[in-house]
Amino acid sequence: MGNRITRGIVKGQRGITGLETAIILIAFVVVASVFAYTVLSAGLFSAQKEKEAVSVGIEGTSSAITISGNIIAKDTDGDKDVDQLIFTISTVLGQESNIDLTVTTDTNGDGLLSDEANKVHATVVTYFDRDINLDDIAWTKTPIGKNDGDNILEAGEKFRFTVYLTALPSANSLTAYDTFTLEISPPRGASVIISKTIPAVTSAVMVLN
């Protein structure tokens, strides 16, 4: 009789121990699952951030615009120096960046936008040669071909740029054999550099090679 009672107690203790072990195992599985999910989420978030950083880096070091066709120099007053530089820009193939080409009016006609009180332009054009450097010089733009009528250069669109050299002092005018550089700095992406030399014989309209 006593042996039966003892065996019953032992069996009951074994049953409780097994239930406790199962609960502990389930708790371990739940904690491990939560930890694994946390680690996985952190890894995915880190990978996404790295991807965004790479994309920003590529965008910052690659230009979103390109020059299409020739660079044209104009002598508008027949004094044998260049007064205007004209070229066409478009977006780089495969890039979807939209470039703001809103223009600030050169109200005083001095060829500079840096001294304007109400600046609205985001794209900046800089001129320099071996003797002079002019930041934020005057420019205008005209849409060519397909265009939706706004000031944003989008994929498939082209704009004709006219850069004015009015700000150049007479002693530094752009004449035969002179080499110059234009830097076009859009609000997004790297700048576009144009370096050209004026031909030996100047005329009203010149295509710069």
Image: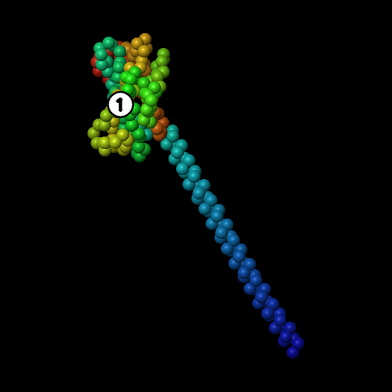
In this orientation, which residue lies closer to the viewer: 84 or 106? Answer: 106
Please name the colour scheme applied to the rendered image.
Answer: rainbow
Tell me if mark 1 has few (under 14), some (14-19) or many (20+) residues whose alpha carbon lies within 10 angstroms of its own: some
Task: Give, as a three-letter code, the residue at label 1.
Answer: Thr
Residue 96 percent across, percent down from the top left = 35, 39
Q: Is residue 166 visible?
A: yes
Count how many numbered circles sit on residues in the image: 1
In this orientation, which residue lies closer to the viewer: 74 or 151? Answer: 151
On the rendered image, what quadrant is the N terminus found in? Answer: bottom right
Task: Determine the residue positioned at 36% across, 13% down.
Answer: 169
Q: Quadrant of residue 147?
A: top left
Task: Determine the residue positioned at 41% across, 13% down.
Answer: 131
Lateral position of residue 85 relative to residue 8, left or right: left
The secondary element bearing badge 1 is classed as strand
Residue 178 percent across, percent down from the top left = 35, 14
Task: Determine the residue positioned at 58% across, 60% down.
Answer: 32
Residue 60 percent across, percent down from the top left = 44, 34
Disc 1 designates what residue?
140
The residue furthest right is: 2
Q: Is residue 177 visible?
A: no
Lateral position of residue 11 relative to residue 123, left or right: right
In this orientation, which residue lies closer to the viewer: 176 or 80? Answer: 80
Task: Determine the residue positioned at 26% across, 36% down.
Answer: 149
Q: Quadrant of residue 168?
A: top left
Q: Is residue 202 above or below residue 43?
A: above
On the rendered image, what quadrant is the C terminus found in? Answer: top left
